[in-house]
Image (tube, rainbow, N blue to C red):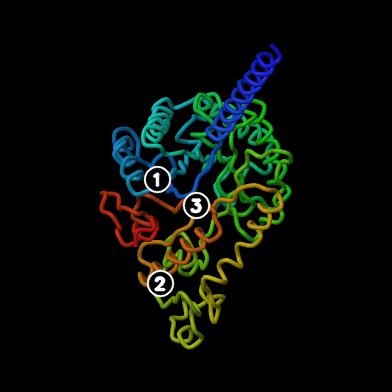
Amino acid sequence: MKLYSKMMKNGFLCVMLLITTVSYCQSSEQKKSESFTVYKGTNIAHWLSQSGRRGEERKQFFTKADVKAIAAMGFDHIRLPIDEEQMWNDDVERHDDAFELMDNCIKWCEEYNLKVIVDLHILRSHHFNAKEKPLWTEAKEQEKFFDLWRDLSKALSKYPNSLVAYELMNEAVADDNESWNKLLKNAFAAIRELEPKRTIVIGSNRWQSVDTFDALKVPENDKNILLSFHFYTPFLLSHYNASWTNLKGYEGPVHYPGVLLTEKEFNTLPKNVKPSVKRYVDVKFDKEILLELWQKPIQKAKSLGLPLYCGEFGIIEGAPKKEALAWYEDMMALFKETGIGHANWNYKSGSFGLVADDGTPYQELIDIITNKK
């Protein structure tokens, strides 16, 4: 009888241990499945952001076939920029056709096992390169910004936390860092009231620059945060002859790795372009220097125990090809060495794209970005 009781007791303990183990595994798997982790992605620019395309033209610019192609390249996520003026009218009423495109895109990504970062890219009250930005001076514009996120949450909360993340705002450019920190805190709180566990992507003031990352105040005691920086350094190479910058018209030499522009080369340039490139003379860049420039975001992420992400990086079409590809190779090597997730700017455009507007692939760049070289 004692032996029987002992056997029953031991059997009971084994069953309880099995149940506990299964429960723990299920809990761990559930927690893992709910997490939002990204490694390699691409931006879907000039579709729901920074584009005059509308109607059928906009609908056909980015389709399910593109999502399939992105997945086939080996990416695990997309960053999806959206603009206020494309998604809502002035009264924060939805443009249903734009919301339908966004929903379709997310569903396509889910089908092809891609995650999505929805990035509120440009506001009517804030463009990262505009001189006047009412967002920083008018309380009604700040409240409108919060309302946009409340409405986005209503539209997107149906998607799992493991599938969709929210990026508060692209490249905040406030006159002082504290203005961005304050706005960030309030926008973050507005989302958290609705979605306590959604991953929120935040970056530093002044174009999500590495230089201002130490001034970024990150909401405390929240692990569902992805810290994000953008990187287009050296600018002389990444924005070579870019029409919207002071480098417009510059078609002179630029070198990478090494000294960007020698003094001898500078002296031979036309007088009209010298002022815009003078600061690059005898300035050196290479892989080690790039990594050194990343240290502020790396240390911030490390101190807070949060993941780090480079949401944009790239070089404009038309820059010297050899130097551009060498830079991309160094960037990809650094992402691999540091474990930093990343999304190149961008997938489909004639300026920075992996493919041209007509779908023609830039295969050499694709091979580097996807580690197939």
Instruction: Answer with mark 1 or mark 3, whichever residue precedes in sequence.
Output: 1
Comparing 94 with 313, the one in front is 313
Q: Position of residue 172 (x, y in %)?
A: 61, 48
Q: Position of residue 56 (x, y in %)?
A: 29, 33
Q: Are marks 2 and 3 in contact (CB under 8 Å)?
A: no
Q: Is residue 45 above or below residue 113?
A: below
Comparing 194 with 58, the one in front is 194
Look at mark 2 in the image and give the residue it sits on: 323
**Picture quarter containing residue 125?**
top right
Q: How many numbered markers are drawn?
A: 3
Q: Can residue 122 be seen in the rendering of this structure?
A: no
> Badge 1, how many Cα within 10 Å: few under 14, some, many 20+?
many
What residue type is disc 2 on? Glu
Instruction: Answer with mark 2 or mark 3, whichever residue precedes in sequence.
Output: 2
Look at mark 1 in the image and give the residue it sits on: 46
Nearer to us: label 2 or label 3: 3
Q: Position of residue 275 (x, y in %)?
A: 53, 75
Q: Is residue 164 above or below residue 291?
A: above
Q: Position of residue 181 (x, y in %)?
A: 71, 45
Query: Left of 25 or right of it: where is 184?
Result: right
Q: How far is the residue under mark 1 from the one under mark 2? A: 26 Å
Q: Quadrant of the C terminus?
A: bottom left
Residue farthest along the top direction in this orientation: 1
Look at mark 3 in the image and give the residue it sits on: 342
